[in-house]
Amino acid sequence: MNKKIYISTPIYYPNSKLHLGHAYTNVLADYLARYKKLCGYDVYFSTGSDEHGQKIADLAALAKKSPLVYVTEIVESFKELWAKLGIEYTHFVRTTDQEHQLFVQTICDKLFAKKDIYKGFYKDWYCKNDEAYFTSTQLTANHQCPLCNREVVEIEEESYFLKTSKFQEWIKDALTEDNILLPKVRQNELLKNFLTELKDLSISRISLEWGIPLPFDNKHTLYVWVDALLNYLSTFTYSKANWTVEEVWKTNSKVEICQFVGKEITRFHAIYWPIILKMLNYRKPFVFAHGWIIGADGDKMSKSKGNAFDPIYLIDKYSADALRFYLINNIPNGEDGRFSEKLLIENINGLLVNKLANLVSRTNGMLAKYFNSVVPKGNENDKQRKKTKKLLTAILVDYHLAMKELNFSASTKLLLNYIDQINLYIEQTIPWKQSGLELATILNFLITEIANLAICFSPILTQTSEKLFNWLGIKKVVSYSDLDRNFTGQKLANLDHLFERIKS
Ligand code: MSP
């Protein structure tokens, strides 16, 4: 049986179209999903939209639309973006889906029956933008939201609570001892900022209609974060893929898990989410928290700051592959990283054109000129070829290691190094000065290695790899076992243009 992995992204608020920061999360998740498929895994990749809550209800009212009509239009734009960006998810959860809502209600019933949910009275502060509760000591010095620095409102009402305080020591231990959150720096932040005193979480509102009613008291609607977190369970109950909640989340499950989140929402995913799972007798999650895309002004990219890029604009202008590559390669793993069109262009010209596209077009040109595009038989025992192959094999070992550590930005550097070594081989062997078996050996080797590059880059440069596969006559790549193919005797097709050099 194949190994299995469950990969998830946060579900996004459909309050407006997504920007490049959101696209970053899904590109990383899609990269890992495609990589794992090449390694032979069965992959379940879930994403979706987080549609309830005060913020959405207010925006819909402002647009004079019903909340459902309002969000549906925006959710369509999410799906269009993911299609254009080559995000191959298994299932898309909308929290307004009937199946999700009913599932969430059964979970609430269960927790209420277990007395992990109880009725009380809430009196503290709420930030509508982050849909998050704070005590006055957690607010900024100016009495604003510590996450987004916006106004907070005082809420005083009857509310149901989740008994999270009971798990304070348990979650502290889990964060310190277990591997549930990477990178490490985020663990320390949570321990310092949120775990000195973990209060019970208020999980219902009586003043909000746009949400899931609590099944045992339907004048209350469920707190949007609990509704949203439960998508990581509900997704399995109504997707086309034949996976179950139990097989992924039961305590002795062998299924690997990787839940991608941006660093500002680690609190929900690495404190409340594991506690909810624990209450349900499920296993702990594994969360990978990435950093932020920073705009040209040095601030976190966001719609409200006016520094956000529309990913559709960038894809249409520069291609999905170029954008995917930039995000994976240029944002340092787990840290913040800059984006600007100038940097993207530098990346395309300096790396994708100068290194990758040049190697391919040079090789294609020589093969056409000297061998009428038919791959000649080479000498397998050639010394230089063997020496280079050894180096390339070592690079791939490091590449898989980087992927194991989820060090995405390091992984692309290794693939670039792979290209550099092949280009170096060309400089050392000087094919245009060779003939006969020497020349045939070089070109035979180059074609095999470009095919290897096409396979290794396929989780990142999806369209470019497709073009290379067409050129090489590779019908379908199923796994890394397709590496090191022998193309002797094969006539290669026409090569589609890979990347255009961009004038800046
Ligand atoms: N709806 C919640 C998530 C619920 S998951 C159970 C939410 N939605 S969101 O639309 O505000 O943002 C989702 C993701 O986008 C987060 O992972 C966040 O970090 C990411 N990003 C938003 N702006 C970003 C950047 N400028 N840079 C990188 N990622 C950023 O939170």
Image: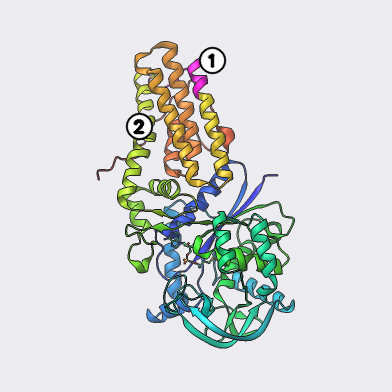
Q: How far from the left and from the top, in percent, is residue 251?
A: 73, 59
Under mark 2, the amino acid is Asn
- Residue 198 falls in which quadrant of the image? bottom right
Seen at 60% across and 78% down, the residue is 203
Question: Quarter of the image containing the N terminus?
Answer: top right
For label 2, the residue is 358
- Report whether the residue tagged 1 is closer than 8 Å to ligand 1: no
Q: Is 411 displayed left or right of 281 in the figure? A: left
Q: How far from the left and from the top, in percent, is residue 156?
A: 54, 88
Seen at 64% across and 77% down, the residue is 200
Q: Any magenta on residue 382?
A: yes
Question: At numbered mark 2, what does the secondary structure look like: helix, strand or loop?
Answer: helix
Can see residue 378? no
Q: Any magenta on residue 437?
A: no
**196 over 387 or under it: above or below:** below
Q: Is 396 displayed left or right of 369 in the figure? A: right
For label 1, the residue is 381
**328 over 468 or under it: above or below:** below
Q: Main secondary structure of the magenta part?
A: loop
Query: Of the residues under marks 1 and 2, which one precedes in the sequence?
Result: 2
Q: Is 462 displayed left or right of 246 in the figure? A: left
**445 over 54 or under it: above or below:** above
Seen at 39% across and 35% down, the residue is 356
The residue segment tinted magenta is 372-388
Q: How far from the left and from the top, in percent, is residue 351?
A: 37, 39
